[in-house]
Image (cartoon, rainbow, N blue to C red):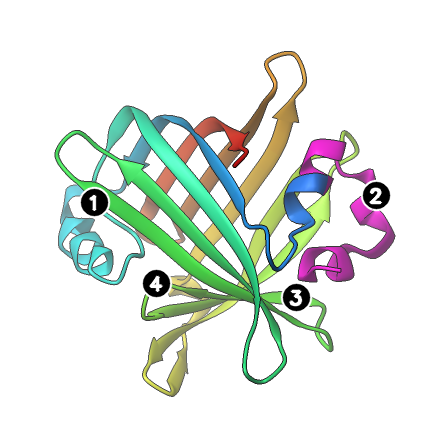
């Protein structure tokens, strides 16, 4: 049972069957997907230096584009502590540069949230709350966040958080996974948004 199955409980069965298969990750069988982001949009020009700095940690990035090739890999693994972790690798192939957006997810059973450490090495932390829509799509929303500096984690005031919404579905007619991601700040507005589609690769 993966952290997503455990967190969602009976609701996991309401996900589209293709999403159930995607989020049922075996430790010896990562999920590989490839597709295209129809659009990737970042924030205002004055945010570019911050986003460029974040890109060094394989986190956010300053690039915009349309029809950008994209790959995703999710690997389930067991840490030395015995805790189960899902390693997310998202790669965006712009014409001039390749960008990565990596994360490490585990579960907080007491608070019923996913712990999401973003960047590599991790620069940023966010609680994530998962839910299933009536038509079987996955909705992910962020909660409290922290800046990570080595072993130190500093809470981010709510006003300065990046408010994240992710919606993932499956289009039966076209046989593709669909994805929409939106990251907003209450002061600065959009930090990043992208949407597109991908298919599972089999090896």
Q: Which mark is residue 62?
A: 1
Q: For the residues marked 4 and 1, what is the alpha-carbon distance in whole angstroms?
A: 15 Å
Q: Residue at x 58, y 85 (%)?
A: 81
Which is closer to the viewer, label 1 or label 2? 2
Which of disc 3 and disc 4 is earlier in sequence?
3
Residue denoted by label 4:
119
Question: Which is in the foreground here, disc 3 or disc 2?
Answer: 2
Please give the range of residues in magenta: 1-20
Say which element carries label 4. loop
Which percent across, then down, holds residue 24?
A: 69, 49
- For residue 113, the mark is 3
Q: Residue at x 49, y 36 (%)?
A: 33
Label 4 or label 1, whichever comes before in sequence order: 1
Q: Earlier in the sequence, mark 4 or mark 2?
A: 2
Comparing labels 4 and 1, the label whose residue is closer to the camera = 4
Q: Which mark is residue 31?
A: none
């Amino acid at each position: 049972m993966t952290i997503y199955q455990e967190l969602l409980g009976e609701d996991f069965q309401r996900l589209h069957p293709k999403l159930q298969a995607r989020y049922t990750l075996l430790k010896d069988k990562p999920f590989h997907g490839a597709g295209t982001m129809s659009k990737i949009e970042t924030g205002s020009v004055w945010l570019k230096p911050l986003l460029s700095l974040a890109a060094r940690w394989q986190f956010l990035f300053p690039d915009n584009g349309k029809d950008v090739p994209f790959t995703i890999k999710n690997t389930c693994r067991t840490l030395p502590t015995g805790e189960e972790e899902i390693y997310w690798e998202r790669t965006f192939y712009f014409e001039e540069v390749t960008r990565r957006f990596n994360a490490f997810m585990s579960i907080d059973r007491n608070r019923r949230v996913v712990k999401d450490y973003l960047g590599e090495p991790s620069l940023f932390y966010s609680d994530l709350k998962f839910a299933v829509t009536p038509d079987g799509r996955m909705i992910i929303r962020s909660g409290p966040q922290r800046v990570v500096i080595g072993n130190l984690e500093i809470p981010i005031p709510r006003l300065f958080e990046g408010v994240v919404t992710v919606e993932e579905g499956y289009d039966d007619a076209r046989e593709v996974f669909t994805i929409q991601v939106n990251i907003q700040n209450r002061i600065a507005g959009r930090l990043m948004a992208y949407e597109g589609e991908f298919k599972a690769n089999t090896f």
